[in-house]
Structure formats: C-alpha cells, structure tokens
Image (tube, rainbow, N blue to C red):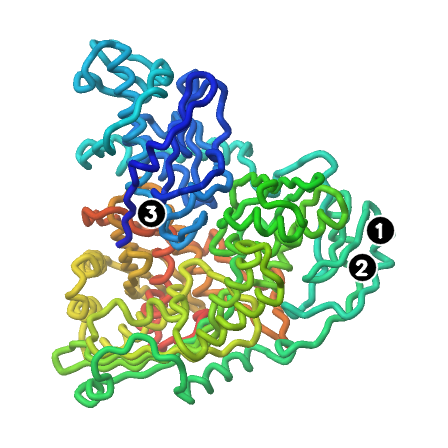
Amino acid sequence: MNTVNVSRRRFLQSSAVAGGGLVVGFSLSGCSTSDLPLPVAEAEGAWTANAFVQILLDNTVRFYTARAEMGQGVTTGLATLLGEELDVNPLDMDVRLASAHEDYNNPLFGMQGTGGSSSTRAHFLPMRQAGANTRMLILQAAAGDLGAEVGVLSTDNGHVVHAGQRYPYADFIESASLLTIAADAPLKPADEFQYIGRESQRVDAIAKSTGTADFGLDIDIPDLHYAVVVRSPVAGAKKVAADTAAARVMPGVTDIVEVASGVAVVAESFWQATQAASKVQVEWEETDLSRVDTATLRADYAAALDAGEGVEGPDEGDVQAAFAAASTIREADYWAPLLSHSPMEPMNAVVRIQGDEADVWTGIQFPFAVAGLVSRMADIPAENVRFHQTYLGGGFGRRGTITHLAEAADVARQTGKPIQLVWTREDDIRQGPFRPASLMRIKAGVDESGQLIAWDTARAGANISPDTFRTLLPAMYPWLGDFLVEGVANASELFFAHFSTDGSSTEGLFEDYDQGNTRVTHMTVDHGLPLTFWRAVGHSYTAFAKESMIDEIAQAAGIDEVVFRLQNTQSSPRRQNVIRIAGERMAQMTVPEGHHLGMAMHHSFSTDVAEIAEVSVEDGQIRVHKVTCVVDCGQAVNPDIVRSQMEGGIIYGLTAALYGDLNLESGAVKESNFHDYRMLRMNESPDIEVIIVDSGTEPTGVGEPGLPPIAPAVANAVYKATGQRLRSLPLRLV
C-alpha cells in the first residue's frame, strides 16, 4: 500500500503577509520548490495555515480541496481528515474547490489529478498532518497569549478551551503568525476520532440539493457564446470539404470556424448552435477505421489470440508442467465490448481570452493540464491562465480527457468571444473516447485436492496509454510540436505492442489467487479508436473473465464456490475474510423459488470486494433482485460515503453487465443516446446491502472497487438458473 510522508521542512516555510497573518507553505509531496504564490486567495486579515486552510477573522475555517468532486464525496472525506486533527467539524467549514497549483499534486500521480480511487488513501496522513500542525500552532499561540502551558489547553470545534472559557481560533492568528513548531504534531489515535469513521452529512449536500452548486454548464458570464462541433461519424477522420452556407444564415449564429476535430458553429444560445450545426454538410476522409465493424474487431482479436504471439507479462513457475499434472482443466474466451462513459453532465468548458490572459471554467479530473493546454491553443503564457474548478457531473475517467477544453480554447481564440463549448450526448457516445473492447482467453487447472495450480491467460485488444500520451503531452509540454507529440504516442504504441504490457490492459486477470504457475500474454490489436480510462479501468472487464472462470473451474472440480475461493486465497487474509463473510451471508439467505445466487470476488485499488447477486430469469430476461456487497477498504472515513460508492459502482456495473454495448458499422458507432444505449432504470435497480469490514488498516480505494465483481456475480447466478455459461458482455441468453 502507498503511504505519504509529510515534510516538516516544507510545512514550515513561511513568509509574512499583510494584516498580521502568516502564510505557511504545505505541499502534499513534501518537496515543492515552486516559486509560485500559494494557491489560495487570501481573505483580508486571515491566517493562511497552508495551501489548504485559512482561518478568517470571524473564525470561519476555509478549506480548499485539491481533488475534483464528481459525486464520490471526496470533499467531505478530505474535510473530515483535516477537521479531525484540526478539531473543527467538517460541516462547519467553508469548503471550496481548489484551482491548479503544484502544491496540490496527488502524491500517487506526481501531478494534480483525481482518479484511480486514490484521493482518500493518498491523503489520509497528509491532510491529517496539516490539521494537526495547524492546531498545534494555534495552541502554541494561545498558550503565550493566555499565559498558560500548552498541556493544559484543549480544543473543541474551532475553539481553544482554558479554565472553562472558550476562545475562537481567530483570536490567536496574529500570535500564531510569529511561531513555528519544532516537529510534526502527533496525530490522534483511532480511539479518539470524533469525525473519522462516523457517518455525517456531505459538505456539498445543501448546495447540490438547492441548486446553488456550480457545475460547468452553470457558468454564465457576460457575452457568453455557445459552440458545438460538427464531427465525423468515424472518430478521428479529417474534413475534406464543408458547406456551411445554410448554417450561417440561421438565427443567432455569429461564427463558423474550423477546428482540428471538424467545424465549430458558434451562436448566442446552445439551442441555436445545435440547430445550425445540423445544417452543416461535411465530406470526411476515409480512414482505416472506416472499414471496421464490431464483427471485424472481435474476429481480429480472436485471430491474435489464436496466433499466440504477444508480449509476455508476469510469468511464474512452469505453466505447461502444471497443466500436465492437473486433474481438471478448463479453457474459455470472454468478450467485453466498447463502452461509453456517459456522465450525467455532458462534457463542457468555458474559455474567455482577453489579450494575453485567459480564464477557464470547467470540471476536470486533471487541473494540471489546463494552463499548458490553453497556452498552447491560444498562444498566451501559461502563467496568465486562470483556472476555476467547478463541480463535475460525473467523471468515470471521461473527465480525465481534455479534448473539449482544447476545442473551446481554439474557438475562443479564433472568434475573440467568451465560449462555452458543449459536447452533445450524441457526440459523447459516438466519438468517445471509449473503454476498449477486449477478448480474453483463460486456461485454468486444479489438482486433485482442489488447489489451483495453473493459470494461463491472454488478452487481445488496444492499449489506453498511447492515447493518454497523445492527449496529455500537449498540455504538459506546450512547446512540444504536433509532430513530436504524435511521435511519442506512436512510439508508445510500438513499445506496448512489442516490448511491455500496458498495465491497465491486463490488471486483474491474474493477481487474486494463489495459483503458483502463471503466464500472462497481451496481444495488441489497435484499429485506431480513441480510448481512455473507464471506471475501474482494466478491472472493469478482467474481473468478469477471471471470476467467471474461477466459478467454472470450481464447479468442474466439484468444489463449492466459496470453499474453492477460500482454499486458493490463503496468502491474503483480507481477501479470505471478505469471501468468508460473503459466504456466511450467502448460506443464510433464503430466496424465492426461481431465484438463484451467484458470487464473485475481486481485488482492485488495494480494496477487496465480494458480491452476491440474487437473480431470476423469466422469458429469457435477466433480473437482478438483490446485491450483497462485502467490502474491506481499510478505515472507512465516512461509512455512508463508502456505502454510496459501492452502490454507485454496482449500479454502473450492472448497466454495463446487462445493457452496455457500442456497435461499429463502417467505423461509426451505431448508438447515439440513451434510447439505444440503455442505462439501468430505477424499476430495474436491485436492493443493495453493503457490509463494511474494518481490517484496521489505512484507507484504500472506494470509488471503483464496487464495480468489477458485479458482472461475474450475475453471470454465475445465471448459470445456476439456466445451465448456460455466459461469456460475453452484455449478458444475453441464447
């Protein structure tokens, strides 16, 4: 597990500010050398304890959260960590979304970004230490002002308590500005926690329930114009010719300009822009992708698996010898299709360029990329780009991409107008970027005792990393020419195709069980589709293959599914514990006639999850009635948020398991909106029970681990109901 140490040296860097306050620099990495000013907007007379915390004269504690809030509850979680050690109720804080600054870098990424279920596990110690050190400075200041020893003082929700009197922290900020602490303040033991581990209201609940929270689509500034882009049906195809005459005379249209992805129509309202865009006629080039459909995709993947030539991943023991000794062997292929992220809020960005300065409003998972990208697109200094983070209406990896921001900056530069560029739902579903399709082949063998002794797995499909390089390099290095950007991306494609596996392609296929003899192979087959991370990344499809095979090989060996999993996870007590608890709950369940229970377990983002799906099959239709989820994510900072994230992951995963399917025809995605790219509906949603197991460790991932086990749990239940092994997603009976 990754842990982060906070450097006192960086924390104690300070400089005097007006109003008797103090700025104490604090970097999550503990080693910032930035010459930039602290990223908080100093309130007059306030004490800025670090890049995250201000104490105002009215005793308000203002907290700037450096991670993007896209519904996962990260603002509440991080405020809880800080508030626990600062001794301030998180619900009493003024919580704000931080801008971009290197002191906000995610310690697990080395850049400012939110993803990979990393926020709580990466910040569990640093945010607590920031709170503890700030509280200690306040106590030292109070001791001097009150003529008392620090040891006789206590704190209570933003107040110093002495001799029965309560004094607001704000009373001591002037004295605190003159002090430093000799070492990091001690952290509370777990048995003294007031907020960590307890359920509470989310800090953003009122703003979101009253409509006062600002999402990207809510931004409204003077003279704002709206842009939509006419795009090729085949992702990535370039424009050959365009007829814009009919669009130019439509009501409200002010500009029509070319961008890298097509033709941008600008109007006084979004509706006017979309209506005018429908009148633009474009001739697109034919690409290699234009000749690809879904059947082609799958056939090419199967041919690659049959050829058996790929990049070797983990290779342990002697797989062939183990198969020779195995008493039971099973082999099967598993298919996972292209998927869209489809966040509730469409992709959007507002860019206003004034001279050599720019303002940007958007909800994005990687703020570090904003300044460099806008600098590149608008030809202005990166330091003159001001970023205003908004709430994100769902992320799922989609808001880790920045194409929409590049387009908005380009249109704003060309038109000289403040621009809100919006991807329509159709744009998002048809143009991607997508979760890659995958074809996986697993061969497993067990000995006579039921021990898994051989595991040979291969995956064919495209890699995510090259598209990541292609997208982020221009933002990270604005001076890098387009030729070099494409060169690096192409080099990475060759690298992952011939020399090393892309970790996100095969993660989750082989790590969870004690099979001993393991071989992993990856066959890169890339048709040029734009790809990016999807919720749970590779685990979103590898868990389906792996847990389906585990169930099948256990059944073939005549061993109970729970017993088999316990027998083959002895190296991981945490994993065994969630399996055992799930198994006990499964044994206690009484289900109606025609209902069947399926189980799956998966480890992802340092978290272990076991899920039980109660399923019925009527008239060929699969219905999931209840899901029981057992999760060990270490210390649950807020149990209610943990439950919410498990529930959300299960619903999102069920949508993919039962309906998720994008189909190509001549390179173009056939689906366009929610009428043909179905979401799970409220009347189809199962009851969900979440059992949180506290293993006594620091927090691990929560946002994504609930998703991977649900598809195989449902598939394993369907087998019990019908005798059919469903090996393709979405799950459909034949």
Mark 1 and mark 3: span between their CA atoms?
51 Å
Q: Is residue 481 above or below residue 523?
A: above
- Quadrant of image for the C terminus: bottom left
Determine the residue located farthest toward the left in the rendered image. 449
To which quarter of the image does residue 572 belong?
bottom left
For badge 1, the amino acid type reads: Met
Neighbourhood count class around disc 2 (C-alpha, 10 Å): few under 14, some 14–19, many 20 upward: some
Which type of secondary structure does the marked residue at label 1 adopt?
loop
Q: Is residue 577 above or below residue 217?
A: below
Front in this rendered view, residue 158 or 685: 158
State the residue at coordinates (38%, 29%).
14
For badge 3, the amino acid type reads: Ala
Mark 2 and mark 1: span between their CA atoms?
9 Å
Which type of secondary structure does the marked residue at label 3 adopt?
helix
| Residue 696, percent from left and from top | 19, 46
| Residues at discs 2 and 1 in contact (Cβ within 8 Å) | yes
State the residue at coordinates (67%, 50%).
379
Which numbered mark, 1 or 3, is in the foreground of this view? 3
| Residue 526, percent from left and from top | 52, 76
Which residue is under mark 2?
Answer: 279
| Residue 287, percent from left and from top | 66, 76
Q: Is residue 495 above or below residue 330?
A: above
Front in this rendered view, residue 42 or 330: 42
Name the mark on residue 250. 1
Which residue is under mark 3?
Answer: 122
Q: Is residue 67 above or below residue 143?
A: below
Front in this rendered view, residue 459 or 733: 459
Q: Give left or right: position of 592 versus 491.
A: left
| Residue 344, percent from left and from top | 54, 50
To which quarter of the image does residue 71 belong?
top left
